[in-house]
Amino acid sequence: MSYAGTNVQSPMQPNWEHFPHQADMGVRGIGLTKEAAFEGAALALTAVITNPAKVIPTQPVTVACEASDDELLFVDWLNVLVYEMATRKMLFSRFEVHINDHSLHATAWGEPVEVIRHRPAVEVKGATYTDLLVKQGQKGYWIAQCVVDV
């Protein structure tokens, strides 16, 4: 279930959208920086599960990952978030990403899942390499996208 087709904020905020893909769901982050695109895609990941506006960002969780290129780093980033959500039984709605070469350090803020309030629609099993893309577009915006298995 998708809670918003596109979340258009200001140009300084990370934006996100979903795109359909057979039985799964595509997540896409769009931002002025690669970090903002990764943050937007993380918010899109949450939006596959629940309405991100219902998730109160009170508890910080620090994560890190490394990969040989931006696309693999992006998949690792989303999979780290899927792992943290599953093991901590949390949802996240705020993200701060820092990327140096192909090393990512981030903080995700969220709260424990409350089934009645959050009404989770699906469980995301993981990010895939399907439709995987991390690139800077012609207008300078970064796009980070892939399909997640639900």
Image (tube, rainbow, N blue to C red):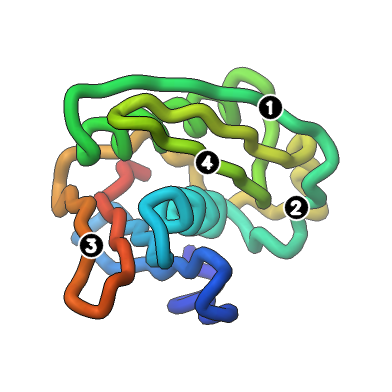
Q: Quadrant of the C terminus?
A: top left
Residue shown at the point (34%, 28%) measured from the top left: 76
Give amino acid for label 4: Val
Distance from Cα at disc 3 to Cα at disc 2? 30 Å
Cα distance, mark 1 to mark 4? 12 Å
Residue 29 appears at what percent x and percent y?
Answer: 39, 60
Other-residue count near label 4 (Cα within 10 Å), few / some / many at <14 / 14–19 / ≥20: some
Question: The residue under label 2 is which amino acid type?
Answer: Val
Q: Amino acid at mark 3?
A: Gln
Q: Tag 2, which secondary structure?
A: loop
The answer to whether residue 42 is visible is yes
Mark carried by residue 55: 2
Vertical relation: 86 (above or below) 1: above
Q: CA distance from mark 1 to mark 2?
A: 14 Å
Instruction: Give the residue drawn at x 73%, y 41%.
Output: 110
Spatial separation of the CA atoms under disc 3 and disc 4: 17 Å
Which residue is disc 3 drawn over?
136
Crowding near pointer 2: few (<14 within 10 Å), some, many (20+)? many
Image position of 114 (left or right of 34): right
Where residue 47 sits in the image (x, y, percent)?
Answer: 54, 59
Mark sitting on residue 82: none
Residue 5: percent from left, percent from top: 44, 77
Question: Mark 1: which amino acid?
Answer: Val
Q: Residues within 10 Å of mark 1 (few under 14, many from 20)?
A: some
User: Which residue does the numbered mark 4 point to in the structure image?
Assistant: 97
